[in-house]
Amino acid sequence: MRIIHVMDYFQPQLGYQETFLAKEHMKMGHEVFVVTSNRYDPLIYSSNKTLLERRIHEAGFFVEDGINVWRLKTLFELPYEIWMRGLEKKLSELKPDIVIVHRIVKLESVRIAWLKKRRGNFKLIYDDHMSFDNSTSILRILYPLFRWTFSRLIQGSADALVAVNDAAKDFMVKRYGIPPELITVIPLGADDELFRFDEVARQQVRSQLNLNESDVVFIYTGKIVPQKRLPLLIEAVTLLKSHDNLRVLLVGSGPTNHIEVIKQDIRNAKLDNNFIWHDAVPNRELYKFYSASDVAVWPREASISQREAMACSLPIIISEASMVTDLVDYENGLICKEDDPSDLARQMERLLDPELRRIMGQNSRRFVEEKLSWKVSAKRFIELVS
């Protein structure tokens, strides 16, 4: 089959859901294309300039990270919205069997719904990630308008509607007005071939970072932005000062002013020896840093990286406010109380036990292999319309 993934912005270097689904569909033997704009997401670009180089690109056909990509010219771009020129024409030329549109409240979602109504010669799946916790943009005031104008069109044109978790499903029901029985939850996953424990990488990275074998490394990966609540991690480590072999590895990037605030907080707490900074790395390199670590921790918001860390056999610590507490269903990690550095410190201290880390790490890998691999997710997307 020919499968088209449509999204307004596409950054394959960073390894988001769209990239891995497209790759897995290719591995299944399908002909796959991504149709997107000739620009990177402005917010993602501002936090990852060292990896993404420039934001605006030429339009045309490219092979990016092994994926066939059509980048369309941009007619106009607004905050959180973009209009791709010739979208309907390109889809008609490609003659897809399945179109998967990523994110529902977007102009291209409505345009493709109208195309499906007119042509009706392909299966249409909508996939959405929004939740009440991350619905913070000014565009949230448009959800009621969308509900009373385009929600019925989307429902009537879609062959399947997908939420990435229960929180996203709840948001689709309450904000988009979509009946819950029309929504299937297909969780985000991890590439369990790319992400795996690598002993050689562990030794290399720990050597580069001047880590001793006795050091217990807690890794955080992702955006360095206020909503990730990294100060909670600093406060927790302050409470664990007596453990002189505890290290925290921060891998990511973000606004310079916010990073400087975090670094100053670390200096003020006299924790310079406990924290190690590393710029964001391409997604395909992250497994090396997980392999070099002993525990993965996210003090507040959820991240797709949690599953990738699990695939590398790491136990995880996540917040009860993350909305993905089911990620420790295999007894492969611990949950800390929301915005409570003392409880975060308690959970970190528990995982200073090497035997507990070993058992939970094995459970993490098993969880990914059995339920959270992109292989499983990609197959389920196809099964929805087969």
Image: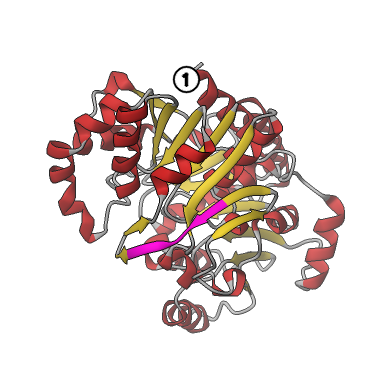
**Image quadrant in which you'd find residue 25:** top right
The residue at the point 57 percent across, 50 percent down is: 305
Which residue type does callout 1 highlight? Leu
x, y percent for residue 235: 45, 67
The residue at the point 62 percent across, 46 percent down is: 308
- What colouring style does the render use? secondary structure
- Where are the magenta residues, as a range? 70-76
Query: Foreground: 366 or 120?
Result: 120
x, y percent for residue 291: 75, 53
The residue at the point 85 percent across, 51 percent down is: 199
On screen, residue 169 above or below 275: above
Residue highlighted by disc 1: 384
Query: Foreground: 180 or 10?
Result: 10
Residue 219 is inside the magenta segment = no
Residue 72 is inside the magenta segment = yes
x, y percent for residue 279: 62, 72
On screen, residue 289 above or below 353: below
On screen, residue 2 above or below 334: above
Q: In which quarter of the image is the N terminus?
A: top right
Relative to 70, 325 lies left or right: left
Does residue 315 appear in this view? Answer: no
Relative to 26, 206 lies left or right: right
x, y percent for residue 338: 36, 50
Q: Which residue lies furthest to the top in this view?
A: 386
